[in-house]
Image (tube, grey):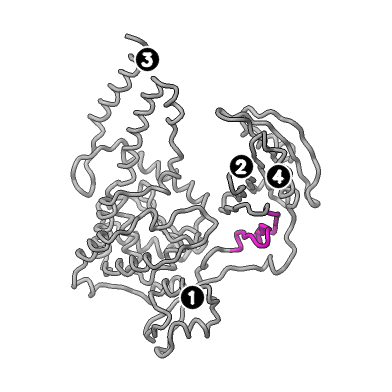
Amino acid sequence: MKRTSRVTWVVVSWVAVLLAVACAVNPVSGKKELMLFSEQQEIAMGQETDQAIRQQYGIYPDKELNEYVDRIGQGMVPNSHRPKLKHHFAVLDTPVVNAFAAPGGYIYVTRGILALMNSEAELAAVLGHEMGHVAARHSMAQMSGQMLAQIGLVVGSIVSKDIRKFAGLASIATQLLFLKFSRSDEYQADALGIRYARAAQYSPGEMLRFFSALENMSAESSSQRIPTFLSTHPMTKDRIAKVKEQVSSADVRLAVKRNDYLQRIDGMVYGDNPRQGFVETGVFYHPEMAFQFDVPNGWAVENTPMQVVVGEKEGRAALLLQAETSGQDLDAYLQAKAKGLEQAKLLRTAGEAVNGFTARHAWFQVPQQEGEPLAVRLSCIRKGGLVYSFVALSTYSTANSFHPVLGRSIESFRAVRDPKILNRGPERLSVMHPDGRQTFQTLLTHAGVDRSHWKQLSVFNSLSLDAVPEASTLVKMLR
């Protein structure tokens, strides 16, 4: 027997044994299913994913709002199919409308989706839906299937070099964030969301109002690359019809708690938060950290709590910025950063200051496994107790075209001194009691809300502009 065939036979035999033993009873269906992860592994994966999500997207800095969402979620856990699993609920600091669950009971809602909701019952239904994905282990079942596919690629890699390059998987956190569940998974999660919300004495029919708002929602503009609820939880007519079938007339007697909920989100940040950075007239400003730098004309900017990425529109060059608290000598700091560039060839160094700030710079040629080498510039700039690290990237053959542009951006780094920039704050939701006589459009006009927000607020309140809100209820405005 040839060595390649023998190794392949061993791997295939191992896979056969794995398939024979890797079955578990699904907590919801009670049926056996293929599952390559134990509950302990699922929880460990969730903990790792939670750290990545918190670092990448940030938790909304409102302790009371996070505690409120957690309390609603924890109130449903005893009635779930995994009551002994410790659940965690948090609000992500992004205007994108989404909710999702990581393995092991880690559940997130964005402040964007909270702005879209109009009652505690809606929140309970959405949290229940995500709890349903966790209870039925939907993400773990999908990852088990991906692992089997990966094993198949490993077998192929032993036999064929051409297949080997496809054998890698993306990071688990990224996979989970962009995971799209099957239609049957969504149906099951909806049914479980209804069941869990009803058991907690919330009217599950409010899920239909939420679905309606989702369908009417205009596309949101955000610099954060996080998917929307509609992309990760596709809406279909069948899905809405199935939810309608499961809602009973008796449910109307259960709690909705509209005004209670709206009072909780009063003052919540609406839209992008300029305190965390924004682009205006070709300049990236960060009021909170009081710095700015020029953005090349026509380049895209992605801003997250972890880093700022400026990319050329065709993806041929990029500029990355990260900030870190450090008292380390700047030369030693740059050398430590440079160790992350594998097999890099140092071309030259420089120590010119940048607009009065101490700085160190280094240029490298970095080989790639496939394709031509990269031209990389690493610049570390000290401002106060922070070191700002810029990494400029392009292919080596295009360095003469792109690195002068990238260099000008790096060398434009400076302190923000304009009070109008330093004091720039976000818009916030504001709730008010209507008088029962004025239309919603009249209320918006009197409140001085910019017309550009009218359509979105109409959706967020489930009110047409010519509707007259009742005096007994609250409506969401902006301040």
- Earlier in the chain: of badge 4 and badge 3, it is 3
Label 1's element?
helix
Cα–Cα span, label 3 and label 2: 40 Å
Label 4 – label 1 distance at C-alpha: 48 Å
Residue 291, magenta (yes or no): yes
| Residue 136 in picture, x, y percent from top left | 27, 48
**Tag 2's secondary structure?**
loop
Q: Nearer the viewer, residue 421 or 368?
A: 368
Residue at left 67%, top 54%? 297
Q: Alpha carbon of mark 2 to alpha carbon of mark 4: how far?
A: 34 Å
Q: Are marks 3 and 2 in contact (CB under 8 Å)?
A: no
The part of the chain drawn in magenta is 274-295
Provide the residue designation for mark 3: 4
Residue 341 is situated, as x and y percent measured from the top left of the image, at 63, 33
Q: In this rendered view, identify the residue nearer to me: 336 or 111.
A: 111
Name which residue lies at 69% across and 49% down.
Answer: 386
